Image (tube, rainbow, N blue to C red):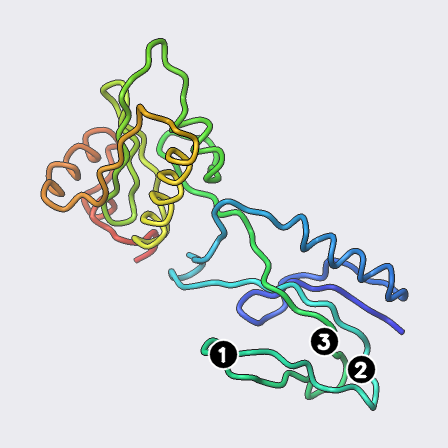
C-alpha cells in the first residue's frame, strides 16, 4: 500500500510533503508535522494576482481500495460532509488545518519580515535610553513610532494590519512592557499621516492611499 502527505491551498494540492509504503512511518511523520506547526501570525491572505482569503490543510492519504469509506468532514457552517475521490485513486485518512507564518513588507528592509522579526527588530529595537513607542495603523499600513521616526509595515489588506496590531499589543501586554502605547486605527488625521508617509518613502499618492497590496 502506498501513502502520501500533501499540503493543499484553498482545497487544491500545493505540494507533496512525504511518501511511504509504511503506514506507521508516515503517521509518525504526519503527527510530527502537526506538532511542529506553530506560528505566531498565520498567513490568511494571498496577494497573488489579487488579494483574497487563503487557507491551508495537511492531508494524509492512501491508495484507494474498493471497500474504502468516504472521509467525514465539516463545512464552513458546521454541516457534516463526505469527501471522496471521484477518480478512485486516493482515500483521505486524516486532514487538519496547516499554517504558514505570514511575512510583511517593511519600508527600507531588504527582506520581508515575520511578526516575530517585527517584534524583535522594530518594536523591541534597542535604544540608548528607554523611549516611549507608539503603534497605530491606517488601512493596510501599520506604523511603529519611536525616536522621532517611524517604521512602516505594509500588510496585504486592512484586516491583516489590524490583526498584526492586535498581535503586537498582546505581546506587549503579556510581557508587561510599559513603554509602548497602542492608539488604534488612525481616522481623524489620515491626510496628515499620508503626507508623513509620502515624505518618508517617496511613494506615489496612489500607493500610499491604496488599501490593499494589489489594485
Residue 92 is labelled as 3
Horizontal placement of 12 versus 200: left or right? right
Spot occupied by residue 18 in the image (x, y as percentages of width and height): 78, 59
Q: Quadrant of residue 11?
A: bottom right
Tag nearer the camera, 1 or 3: 1
Spot occupied by residue 39 in the image (x, y as percentages of width and height): 55, 46
Q: Report, in whole angstroms, how far the alpha carbon at label 2 lies from the one at label 3.
A: 9 Å
Nearer to the camera, 95 or 10:
95
Horizontal placement of 79 versus 214: left or right? right
Residue 23 is labelled as none
Nearer to the camera, 198 or 142:
142
Quarter occupied by the C terminus: bottom left
Quarter occupied by the N terminus: bottom right
Q: Residues within 10 Å of mark 1 (few under 14, many from 20)?
A: few
Residue underneath mark 2: 64
| Vertical order, 199 against 72 (above or below) | above
Tag nearer the camera, 2 or 1: 1
Q: In which quarter of the image is residue 175?
A: top left
Horizontal placement of 50 versus 133: left or right? right
Of the two numbered discs 1 and 3 on the same chain, state the one appearing first in sequence.
1
Tag nearer the camera, 2 or 3: 3
Q: Report, in whole angstroms, how far the alpha carbon at label 2 lies from the one at label 1.
A: 27 Å
Residue underneath mark 1: 78
Q: In which quarter of the image is residue 56?
A: bottom right
Q: Is mark 2 on a helix, strand or loop?
A: loop
Of the two numbered discs 2 and 1 on the same chain, state the one appearing first in sequence.
2
Question: Among all residues in the image, which is located at the extreme bottom?
Answer: 66
> What residue lies at 33% left-to-right and 10% top-to-bottom?
129
Amino acid at each position: 500500500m502506498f501513502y502520501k502527505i500533501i499540503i493543499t491551498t484553498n482545497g487544491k494540492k500545493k505540494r507533496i510533503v512525504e511518501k511511504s509504503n509504511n503506514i506507521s512511518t508516515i503517521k509518525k511523520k504526519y503527527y510530527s508535522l502537526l506538532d511542529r506547526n506553530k506560528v505566531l501570525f498565520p498567513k490568511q491572505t494571498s496577494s497573488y494576482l489579487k488579494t483574497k482569503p487563503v487557507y491551508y490543510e495537511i492531508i494524509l492519504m492512501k491508495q484507494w481500495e474498493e471497500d474504502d469509506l468516504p472521509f467525514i468532514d465539516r463545512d464552513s457552517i458546521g454541516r457534516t460532509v463526505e469527501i471522496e475521490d471521484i477518480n478512485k485513486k486516493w482515500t483521505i485518512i486524516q486532514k487538519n488545518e496547516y499554517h504558514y507564518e505570514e511575512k510583511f513588507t517593511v519600508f527600507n528592509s531588504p527582506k520581508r519580515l515575520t511578526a516575530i522579526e517585527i517584534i524583535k527588530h522594530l518594536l523591541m529595537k534597542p535604544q540608548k535610553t528607554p523611549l516611549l513607542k507608539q503603534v497605530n495603523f491606517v488601512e493596510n499600513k501599520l506604523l511603529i513610532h519611536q525616536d522621532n521616526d517611524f517604521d512602516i509595515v505594509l500588510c496585504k489588506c486592512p484586516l491583516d494590519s489590524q490583526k498584526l496590531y492586535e498581535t503586537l499589543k498582546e505581546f506587549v501586554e503579556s510581557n508587561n512592557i510599559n513603554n509602548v502605547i497602542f492608539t488604534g486605527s488612525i481616522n481623524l488625521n489620515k491626510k496628515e499621516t499620508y503626507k508623513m508617509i509620502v515624505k518618508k518613502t517617496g511613494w506615489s499618492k496612489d500607493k500610499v492611499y491604496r488599501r490593499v497590496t494589489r489594485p
